[in-house]
């Protein structure tokens, strides 16, 4: 890859700041001193899932994916470097401090905007987002439903009994929840989305119970992943994205302890299968869909048709939107972020939350309150302009570290409000706080443009 010079922002590097936008939902996105170096992955598996694996960042400096900004720190104008349309091309933009300023390079076309408006860096990013959303014709929904999901309490141990227990508890405590979602563990395998695991007997029965409580039914899916243990992998190897060296796993081990491959949505068979999955679920009564690990759809490799990775990604989301039907709500997660503008109602804009404040292995892109706060603040300017921001779930049970701080972050920065505690595990403070935080989002921007 070749990085061409774009600009030298003349300033005192010791006073300057750089905003770096990460590649995926999980990728760290924040403002840093220009003389620092932004976070790098500690493990290869994190590079594949969180950072931009096909364009690793240099050892020092910054690499914004489709967007990077430099604030000289002296009251002068903010310099923004952004993709004209990240759905077509999302270049990596690099910045490094040197004597006399900050040098900016890129591996693709970017627009250089000099913003001398009021409000500093945050407002300059907001003004750029206003223009970008208008250019792409983005329309943000007038409100976003509140919800409950089981992930951060049960993870892959979820059972159908757990679902019914929490539905009953939500009813009993009269929590202001609009939607109840079933999460990972309902499916036989990653990729076998229409076959239930031995922990679930009937999705239709579960949906009927959710609807009986006058709530919408939601479901989690990683639609672009195919696990090595799945029937889809065994029966349809031609449905997978091909790499230059053959069909290689996109991800090895980690959550599901198996190799994971990228589904080639340009293959007619794969497209027909994905359409069947979402039409079947809509037929069951699901109308809220959390689409996770979407970075897999933008994997670079050989496909059935001669289309780019970003084109294939957009094709996949458009297919899902059509199959899910009118009135469906789509929440993106683990998605290539800027290429997703205009495709979703809500979007995860941070790494996963966790009961622990710090990430377990020190990588700020991994589950933690510290990482979720970092990017939740850094991408606050996107809310109400591109979608409803999801800085991840409300977790307020007693064992959550610094839970009061996380509650304040949700109150300030969350557009999407979804509780993810076992309701019966909440103490009085947790119940009161959950009830207070579960309010429907509006598209009013969190960061002013003026």
Image (cartoon, helix red, strand yellow):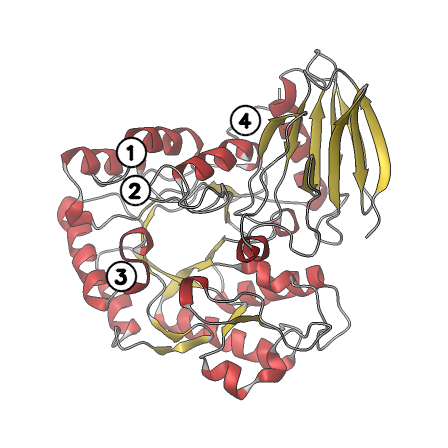
Q: Do the residues labelled 1 and 2 touch (CB within 8 Å)?
A: yes
Residue at label 1? 403
Which is closer to the viewer, label 4 or label 3? 4
- Secondary structure at badge 2 equals loop
Q: Which of marks 4 and 3 is nearer the N terminus?
A: 3
Q: Which of marks 1 and 3 is nearer the N terminus?
A: 3
> Compared with residue 130, is residue 323 higher up or lower down, i.e. above or below?
below
For the residue pair 450 and 401, the one nearer the viewer reads as 401
Residue at label 4? 447
Q: Earlier in the sequence, mark 3 or mark 2?
A: 3
| Real-space Cα separation, disc 4 to disc 1, in angstroms | 24 Å
Q: Earlier in the sequence, mark 1 or mark 2?
A: 2
Q: Quadrant of residue 75?
A: top right
Q: Quadrant of residue 373?
A: top left
Lateral position of residue 240 relative to residue 143, left or right? right
Q: Quadrant of residue 119?
A: top right
| Real-space Cα separation, disc 4 to disc 3, in angstroms | 36 Å
Lateral position of residue 376 relative to residue 52, left or right? left
């Amino acid at each position: 890859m070749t990085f061409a010079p774009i600009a030298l922002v003349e300033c005192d590097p010791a006073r300057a700041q750089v905003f770096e936008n990460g590649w995926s939902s999980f990728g760290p996105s924040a403002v840093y001193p220009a003389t620092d170096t932004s976070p790098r992955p500690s493990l290869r598996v994190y590079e594949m899932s969180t950072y931009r694996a096909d364009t690793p960042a240099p050892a020092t400096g910054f690499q914004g994916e489709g967007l990077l900004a430099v604030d000289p720190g002296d009251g002068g104008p903010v310099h923004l470097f952004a993709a004209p349309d990240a759905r077509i091309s999302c270049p990596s933009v690099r910045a490094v401090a040197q004597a006399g300023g900050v040098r900016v390079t890129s591996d693709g076309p970017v627009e250089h905007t000099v913003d001398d408006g009021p409000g500093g860096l945050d407002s300059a990013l907001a003004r750029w987002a206003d223009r970008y959303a208008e250019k792409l014709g983005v329309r943000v929904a007038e409100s976003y439903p509140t919800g409950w999901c089981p992930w951060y309490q049960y993870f892959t141990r979820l059972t159908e009994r757990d679902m019914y227990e929490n539905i009953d508890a939500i009813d009993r405590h009269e929590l202001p929840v609009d939607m109840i979602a079933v999460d990972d563990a309902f499916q036989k395998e990653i990729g076998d989305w229409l076959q239930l695991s031995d922990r679930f007997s009937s999705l239709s029965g579960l949906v009927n119970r959710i609807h009986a409580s006058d709530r919408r039914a939601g479901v989690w899916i990683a639609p672009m992943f195919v696990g090595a243990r799945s029937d889809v992998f065994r029966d349809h190897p031609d449905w997978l994205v091909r790499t230059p060296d053959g069909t290689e796993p996109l991800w090895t081990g980690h959550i599901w302890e198996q190799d994971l491959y990228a589904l080639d949505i340009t293959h007619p068979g794969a497209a027909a299968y994905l359409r069947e999955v979402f039409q079947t679920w809509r037929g069951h009564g699901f109308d809220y869909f959390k689409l996770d690990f979407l970075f897999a759809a933008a994997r670079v490799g050989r496909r059935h048709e001669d289309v780019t990775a970003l084109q294939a990604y957009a094709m996949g989301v458009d297919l899902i939107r059509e199959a899910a039907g009118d009135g469906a709500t789509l929440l993106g997660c683990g998605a290539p972020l800027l290429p997703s503008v205009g495709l979703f109602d809500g979007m995860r804009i941070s790494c996963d939350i966790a009961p622990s404040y710090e990430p377990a292995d020190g990588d700020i892109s991994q589950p933690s309150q510290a990482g979720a706060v970092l990017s939740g603040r850094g991408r606050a300017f996107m809310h109400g302009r591109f979608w409803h921001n999801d800085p991840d779930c409300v977790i307020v049970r007693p064992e959550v570290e610094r839970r009061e701080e996380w509650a304040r972050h949700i109150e300030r920065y969350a557009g999407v409000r979804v509780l993810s505690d076992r309701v019966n595990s909440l103490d009085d403070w947790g119940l009161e706080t959950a009830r207070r935080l579960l309010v429907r989002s509006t598209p009013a921007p969190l960061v002013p443009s003026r």
